[in-house]
Image (tube, rainbow, N blue to C red):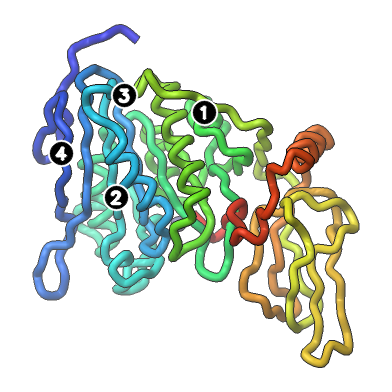
Amino acid sequence: MSETDPESFQYDAAVDPGEKRQFRYEVGETYLGDAVEIPVTVINGEHDGPHVVMTAAVHGDELNGVKVLQEVADRYTPHEIHGTLVLLHVVNVPGYQAQQRYLPIYDQDLNRSFPGKERSNTAGRMAHHVYQQFISKCDLGLDFHTSTRNRTTMYHARADVGNPDVEHLAEVFGTNVILSGEGDDGSLRAVATRNGTPTITIEMGKAHRFQPALIEKALDGVENVLADYGVYPDGDVSEPSWRKVMGPTEEKRWIRADTGGLVEMQWGPSPLVHEGDPICTISDHFKDEEHVVEAPFTGLIVGVLENPVALPGHPICHLVRITPETREEIEREITQGEFDGYRSYGQRWMADDEEAE
Ligand SMILES: [Zn+2]
C-alpha cells in the first residue's frame, strides 16, 4: 500500500490523524428527555490506511464483545496504527442497561433495523445514527455477538463467503468454523456488506458472561485482521490448524428430544462425535426409563442446550457433518490435549444457534 497523507476521520466532528478520542455519542432520548449515548473510541493512526469498525452489544445482553472492545481500545495507539479504528463499545444502550437482547420498548431487534431511517421507529432511528455516522465510513467491520439466553454456541464467524472480500476477512480473522450465509435482512452485517463495508459476525459463547478464553481468541482474531490489512503492521497473523466452512446447504441438524425428562450430556470433552456415539441421556424423575440420544452421523457439535430439562421436540444440540480430513485434524488435536476440559469449562468452545446473530 503506498503511503499517502492520513486524513481526519469525520463524523459530526473530526478526529485528526495521530489522535485517540473517547466520547459518548447521542443516538436517542429516554422518556425523561435525557440523552441515550453510546461509548465510542476512535483511534486515528499517524499513518494512512483502512478504516475498521468494530461493534458490540447490538444485542444488549451479549457481553463478551464489550470486553473485547475495551481491550482493543486500550491496546492500540495512534502511533502504531495505519488507518483508523472505530469502536462502538455498546451499540444497544437501552438493551444493555436492561441486560436484555432487544430494545426494551416494544422489543425491537436493533439487529434487524439497519441501515435505519431518520424518521422511523426507535430502533430504526438509533440504527440510522450509528450507521450513517460511523459504519458507512469504514472499509471493513467486525460485529461481536454471543448466543441467546439458556444456550451456548461454538466460537465461530458468520460471513457471506460468496463475497471474496468477506471471505478473506473471515479467513484472516481465523476461527475454526465459518458459517456461510448472507445474514438476515436488516442485520448490521448484511447491510454493511451489501453497501461496501465487508463485515463478519463473530459468535462467542454465552450471553451475560465474560468468558476469558473466548475473549483472548477474539483479541487474536482482531490482531490477525489488523496485521493482514496493514492497519497494525507489527502484528502477528496466526492461522487456525483446521478450518470448516459450512455452506447454507451443508448438512446440519438440530438433534431433538423424543421424550420429556432430565437431560444429562454425554458427549465431550471435545465437540467431535462419531456416528452412534451417545450425545445425552434423557431420564424420567424416577429413573425408571432412560433414553439415549445418539449421533445420527459423525460431526461437530456447534450449539447446545444448557437448560437441562427437555420436552419431545426440544432442541438438544446442533450437529454439523464434517469431512474425514477435518475429522482427522480434530482427532489429532484431541490427542494433543487441545480440547481438554472443553465441555466442563462452560463450553468455552460452544456458541450459538440460528437465533444468535
Ligand atoms: Zn446477537
The residue at which mark 3 appears reads as 50
At horizontal 38% and vertical 37% (from top left) the residue drawn is: 141
Rate crowding at label 4 as few (under 14), some (14 to 19) or many (20 or more) other CA atoms within 10 Å. some
Residues at circles 1 and 2 in contact by the CB criterion of under 8 Å: no
Q: From this view, report whether residue 38 is shown above or below residue 332.
A: below
x, y percent for residue 116: 29, 52
The earlier-in-sequence mark between 1 and 2 is: 2
Q: Is mark 1 within 8 Å of ligand 1?
A: no
Q: From this view, report whether residue 72 is shown above or below residue 271.
A: above
The residue at which mark 4 appears reads as 21
Q: CA distance from mark 2 to mark 4?
A: 13 Å
Q: CA distance from mark 3 to mark 2?
A: 20 Å
Along the horizontal axis of the image, is 187 left or right of 163?
A: left
Along the horizontal axis of the image, is 238 left or right of 86?
A: right
Q: Is mark 2 within 8 Å of ligand 1?
A: no
In the image, farthest residue toward the top = 2
The earlier-in-sequence mark between 1 and 3 is: 3
Residues at circles 3 and 2 in contact by the CB criterion of under 8 Å: no
The earlier-in-sequence mark between 2 and 4 is: 4
Element at label 2? loop
- In depth, the one of 10 and 341 nearer the eye is 341
The earlier-in-sequence mark between 3 and 2 is: 3
At horizontal 62% and vertical 38% (from top left) the residue drawn is: 176
At horizontal 58% and vertical 28% (from top left) the residue drawn is: 239
Question: Where residue 89 is drawn, which disc sits there?
Answer: 2
Give, as a three-letter code, the residue at label 3.
Answer: Pro
The residue at which mark 1 appears reads as 172
The earlier-in-sequence mark between 4 and 3 is: 4
